[in-house]
Amino acid sequence: MEASGPELARRGRNLMVAGRKTAGQRRADLVADVALAVGMAGLMLGTMQAARAADAAGIQLAQAGQSFDIPAQPLAGAITSFGRQSGLQVTVEAAIANDLQSPGVSGSYTPDEALGRLLAGTGVSYRFIDANTVTLVRGTAADGAVVLDPLSIDATRRAESAWGPVAGFVAKRASAATKTDTPLLETPQSISVVTRDQMDAQAAQTMPQALRYTAGMQTDRNGADERTDFLYARGFQVSQYLDGLRLIGGTWATPQIDSYGLERIEIVRGPASVLYGQVSPGGLANLVSKRPQPDAFNEVQLQFGEYGRLQTAFDMTGPLTEDGDLSYRLSGLARSADTPIDQTKEERYAINPAVTWRAGDDTTLTLLGKYQNDPALGAYQRLPAYGTVLHNPSGDIPTDLYIGDPTFDKEERTQYGIGYEFEHRFDDTFTVRQNARFFRTDSDFGYLYTGRLMAADSSVIRRSGVLAEEVNDAITIDNQLQAKFATGAVGHTALFGLDYQNNHNDSDVAYLAANPIDYNNPQYGSPGIDFTPFFEQNTSQRLEQLGLYAQDQISIDRWRFTLGARHDWLNSDTNDRVANTSTKITDQKFTGRVGALYLFDNGLAPYASYSESFEPLAGTNDIGEPLKPTTGQQYEVGIKYQPTGYNSFVSLALYDLTQQNVLSYGSRTIIDGSGNPQVISFSTQNGEVSSQGIDIEGKISLNDNISLTAAYSYLNAEVTEGTAGDNTAGKTPVYLPEHSGSIWADYRFIDGYFNGLGLGAGVRISDETYGDAVNSFTVPGYAVMDAALRYDLGNLAPDLAGARLAVNATNLFDKIYVADCQNDTNCYYGSRRKVYATLSYQW
């Protein structure tokens, strides 16, 4: 990038021409809220138990096809895993299974096929007593063939995998925590999965919206400002991955993946650097793209709603050849809408092509592409604390206040990427994979932002302007060798990897003085921009990281152990073109993880783990210095519950997490050439922050009728080591509620007069937070409600089969609240009510 601050200013001219609670109260609240959360979990379990008998037939159909992952091990442990993964009741006399070894089974099979492979060579056969119960017996039929009672299989159901679609809200498998297709129940770390069905039911338009009902996730940091996806968990920002590879961005050129192109979102809470290297200790969000499917499926959508919203979308997949070896997926959308902020607009065009080639039974190559153009990014509404969360005699600042100026503001972003996933299975033991991607994000920003009020009781807000151009190029490659084998009675799934990341960021930013704005009488057309920058940043930074890792998932009877180690080498080179200086950083870091989990027959799985994180950060602070890598350590204990026989999953986790060099966001006042104070924002880092807490989450899908998800989190975070002179030691970081929770219930009528009607409703609750780093004021907590109504139009006429109309409302009662304050000049209103109607047709 050749443009400098003055050049940006010239382009700008051309554009112009064109009260927190006490400790005792918090403890009392904690006791009450934990009791409420435990009661809620008990109620969920009671609901599941009551529905179990009525649900048996539906579960058989839903789980007829399965993705099994049972390593070689003693037969007793293998049968326990089979019962849990298949949803079948398995009866066997202890004497039959004694001293026998199972070869294990891995892949997509019906339950009878999987059980046949699991018992191969053991001299044990089986028969089905009914559709849900199987018993093991000594001996086999002639020629070793297993004699089966008839079993009804629904061939239209596909086995679940960690990268594929899920029927309902409850996923059973994920890859983000282990980079292997592993059952959630057997992973000794806290994980959540948001399925496509849940995103559709809640009409999630962005990734943060899709995660609103996920335990421990803070997704509303910038409120109505949805230009960038900020995710927080356990007190820290969450790293974002796309299909297992890091999504890297800078300060302005930050990638944002539209949720319509996703199949699922996986959240791993806590450090995961042993596999990924560059991960925040808060965890990671792995966005799983829609992939080609073997069966033809098509969908078109038309969505319209408040603020002039109009969106069209399509999704098509299926085979390209008669033998099915070549298949495709193509999804995309076009959207235009105003926003709740006056004179602002959002506009997006996105397309996501994908092709899969199956070169035989053992080799697969999938190409994944993404292109997205955002000519208008929507609202930016950073506001001072006085007039939002703090009293101002001049009145409250309107939630629809436009703080910019149409003669100056411009926000555009273009992003595109191309990558592939290659896998080859040599035999039943060894599999190799290589995943790679190039991704570019290009941004061009020009907007006005607010600083402090002229006085605490004034309605006049100081403003500054910023012109920013930034390009971020990222190349990521991950090479893996997986080996599945047994050593005696011990089963192993070993993973060895070498990954590489090369990120180049080029940024040119100029800060400009501007006229203030009176929020009680805003005037537009003469922002008074001084195009001589009072502060300028012009940097080029290249960051390279090489990581070598190893992991072993060990099974011994009902025990599951996960051991991992990694070493990273980091090189960064930052050139400051304003100061004409260059800074080089070379670093290396070892990280590890160890976890243990025990599988009980009743579906309970207690676990304990320790994990570490290491995260290099692209970008610089306010004086042009490169940001230091963060490090983190976490201890976690928990319990998971997946009762055999119906579709549900409940988890509880307690953790103690510490991070060093914590990234935060601050502001600094600079006196411009006219002697006026101007505020700039920048990234900064604290010395150390610790957090302890509890995450509880449950998901239930009963038949095709009821889906329920509920979550509760408690978080106690503290700055244990501040930066010299900032007085933050002992304080609570901003935007971290002690208590938060949510519940969503979804019901679908499948017979009777209301057949085809679906109803959904949910509540999201957040406790108060601190509004600045020194905890001088608080942001009140809030509770908002969402709702959904949908109807399958095929119930009106056969010719309308496949058509559906849905109406979704977020913040149903239009509650006005402040979502977050980061300091006294940087507060954001939460999103006002939005109502959308979506007409879709599938065939």
Image (tube, rainbow, N blue to C red):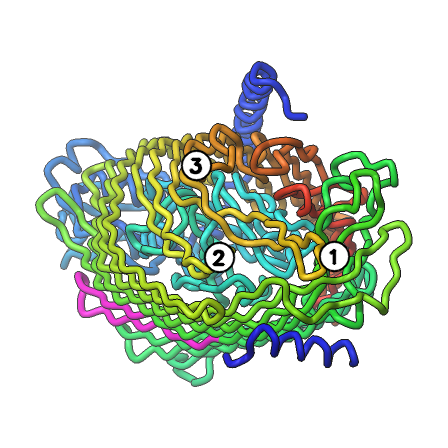
Q: Amino acid at mark 3?
A: Val
Q: Nearer the viewer, residue 321 or 445?
A: 445
Q: Nearer the viewer, residue 603 or 314?
A: 314
Labels 3 and 1: the sequence-earlier one: 1
Could you tell me how many numbered marks the image carries? 3
Q: Is residue 216 above or below residue 5?
A: above
Residue at the extreme right: 521
Q: Which region of the structure is painted magenta?
A: 417-434
Residue 378 visible here? no
Dot 2 corresponds to which residue?
Answer: 623
| Residue 364 is one of the magenta-drawn residues | no
Dot 1 corresponds to which residue?
Answer: 463
Q: Residue at x 57, y 76 (%)?
A: 351
Q: Residue at x 14, y 44 (%)?
A: 490
Dot 3 corresponds to which residue?
Answer: 689
Q: Nearer the viewer, residue 718 or 259?
A: 718
Q: Within 10 Å of the Cα at label 1, are there few (<14), some (14-19), or many (20+) other Cα atoms?
A: many
